[in-house]
Amino acid sequence: MDDNRTMAQLLEAPTEGYEDAIVVPEINANNFEIKHGLLNLVQNKQFFGHDKEDPHAHIRYFNKITSTMKFP
């Protein structure tokens, strides 16, 4: 059986079965604050969904940035 996919298609991460992978958690706090510095860090490297962008690398970067912060 021949595989006629292009190299770009072979390198694409599978998305089938991952539709509900990102779940927004419920916020149970009545009062919370989003620090200005955190917004700047996240906004500096935004994900737009272009063909050359890697969503997995974006999530790794976001996790790396947010893992450095501790919240009560």
Image (cartoon, rainbow, N blue to C red):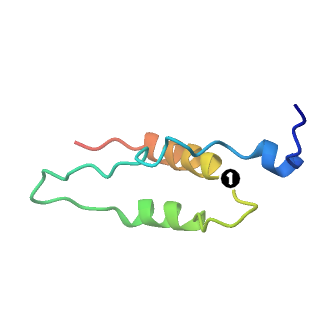
How many numbered marks have been drawn onto this rendered protein structure?
A: 1
Depth order, front residue of 14/61: 14
Name the residue at the front extreme: 1
Q: Residue at x 55, y 48 (%)?
A: 59
Identified at 58% across, 66% down, the residue is 44
Q: Quadrant of the N terminus?
A: top right
| Residue 71, image x, y percentages | 28, 44
Residue type pointed to by label 1: Asp
Q: Is 27 drawn above or below residue 72 in the view shown?
A: below
Left or right of 49 on screen, residue 26: left
Location of mark 1 (residue): 54
The single residue placed furthest to the top in the displayed view is: 1
Secondary structure state at the residue bearing disc 1: loop
Residue drawn at (38%, 67%), measured in percent from left and top?
A: 36
- Quadrant in the rendering for residue 52: bottom right
Residue 50 placement (x, y as % from top left): 68, 67
Q: Can you say whether 35 is above or below 70 in the image? A: below
Question: Which one is in front, 55 or 39?
Answer: 55
Mark 1: few, some, or many residues within 10 Å (few <14, many ≥20)? some
Q: Residue furthest left?
A: 30
**Horizontal relation, residue 10 to residue 48: left or right:** right
Does 6 sit above or below residue 51? above
Return the x and y of residue 48 as percentages of the image width and height.
60, 68
Residue found 57% across the figure and 65% down from its top? 46
Quarter holding the C terminus is top left
**In terms of depth relative to the viewer, which is nearer, 31 or 58?**
58
